[in-house]
Image (cartoon, helix red, strand yellow):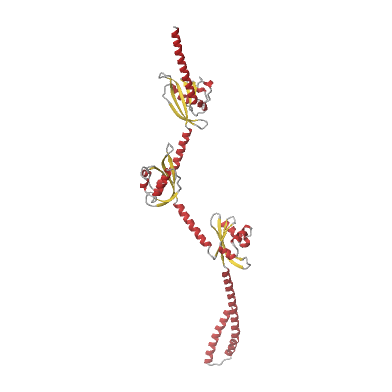
Amino acid sequence: MNEELVLVNGEMKESLDSLARANADLNNLISATDVATLFLYRSLRIKRYTPRACESFTVIPGDVGRLLAHVTHTLQYPELIDDATKVASGKPSARREVESASGATYLVHMAPSDAGDGTADGVIINLIDVTERREAEQSARGLSAVVASSVDSIFSVSLQGDLSSWNRGAEQMLGHAAEETIGQSLQRLRLSSEHARIAAAIEQVVLGQPVAVQDMEWLRKDGSRLDVSASYSPIADKHGGIAGVTIGARDITADRQQAASLRESELRLRRATEIETVGMLFFTMDGRLIQANPAICRMSGMREEEWHTAWQSGEAEACLPGWSRVHDDVQKSGTAHPREMKWSRSGGDEWWALLTATRLSEHEAVAVVVDITDQKRAEASLRESNHRKDEFLATLAHELRNSLAPIRNALAIFTATRGSDSTAETALRIMDRQLKRSYALSTTCWI
């Protein structure tokens, strides 16, 4: 009898030791797990919990046996008790994504706990932190929306060279619909006569090498050409390797045309500044001198450095008479009406100039100066010639009148005392007529 008791006690002790070890292993597992878990009885009273559960539920060891409904939590989950009750009543499981007051996102999974005989004796609630996954999904959706709505052409190519995506910007820029391109070979699409450059860039990306932005000419579906700036980026797979390449292309046709127009404009302006007979002063709208061209330096006898020095020292008006009025006009209306100005060169001699100005841009303007000294001298010479002509004609008229007056008087006397000879009568009429004409001419010259 004693031997049987000893045997039974030994077996019970082994069972208790095994149960203690299993319980210790379970406690160690619960302590070491990084998942927030609550173990509940069927009555929804707390049986046990993992340390991570304390981040969302305000539980302490003394709360074991307490109703879940009496425990506060940070989850935005008003259906928590209802879902747990349904699972405890036999519902297979419940799953929801909920947010906490801290902004974290959790996947809440509820499942019945097994009593060991196939029956449920409670509920297990797991909270899995999926914040990073949610943020990654949101970021991916945002990136997808940006790609889809971008006016730039963005498409991806697999390692086999087939197109795997084609955004709306590519459709609008190149004329190919997504249905026509996805699954097709990039080479067959004939985007560019420089396909070798594109292929080489893709190979570099696949090898992990950086690729510089490429400016090249592409072809639209209708055969028209456009200039693009293409960039290449790797597409990573789930193992961190490269699964393909994304190609982004921006239409720079208008930019290149604008740049070409700007270069032509700058060339024309540079040629204009080199004209020897037209002086130019480039200045900002706030009155700072930018450049004085060679012609204005030659006209004024001042070097460009002297122009800058005069401007900086506030002597612009002394170097350029009427500058203040011109600057004010340009600021108010964008242009200054031509004005004739009398200047003095650095050597002291005077010269005449025609000055005007106009705005070139929002911040810059140019004053144009033309030397009209020769024109002024010619005008003065012409005025002098006219004056001398008037004096000569006046003198001529005076002399004619003086010479004709005695003749006229003598003819009048002769007419008054003449006889009846018809020949003399005719001669007198001729002399009178010519004398009147000469007298009238002298009167006209006098006037």
Residue 376 on image: x %, y %:
58, 69
In this orientation, which residue lies closer to the viewer: 49 or 141?
49
Residue 65 on image: x %, y %:
50, 19
Give me the residue at 45% from left, 52% from top: 254
Quadrant in the picture for residue 12: top left
Q: Is residue 16 visible?
A: yes
Q: Is residue 199 left or right of residue 100?
A: left
Give me the residue at 59% from left, 67% from top: 352
Q: Quarter of the image containing the C terminus?
A: bottom right
Say above or below: 291 vs 71. Answer: below
Outermost residue to the top? 1
In this orientation, which residue lies closer to the viewer: 37 or 232?
232
Say above or below: 11 vs 370. Answer: above
Give me the residue at 50% from left, 60% from top: 268
In this orientation, which residue lies closer to the viewer: 60 or 432?
60
Say above or below: 256 vs 19. Answer: below
Q: Is residue 165 visible?
A: no
Residue 247 on image: x %, y %:
42, 45
Q: How many marks?
A: 0
Q: Quarter of the image containing the N terminus?
A: top left
Quadrant in the picture for residue 316: bottom right
Residue 27 on image: x %, y %:
49, 22
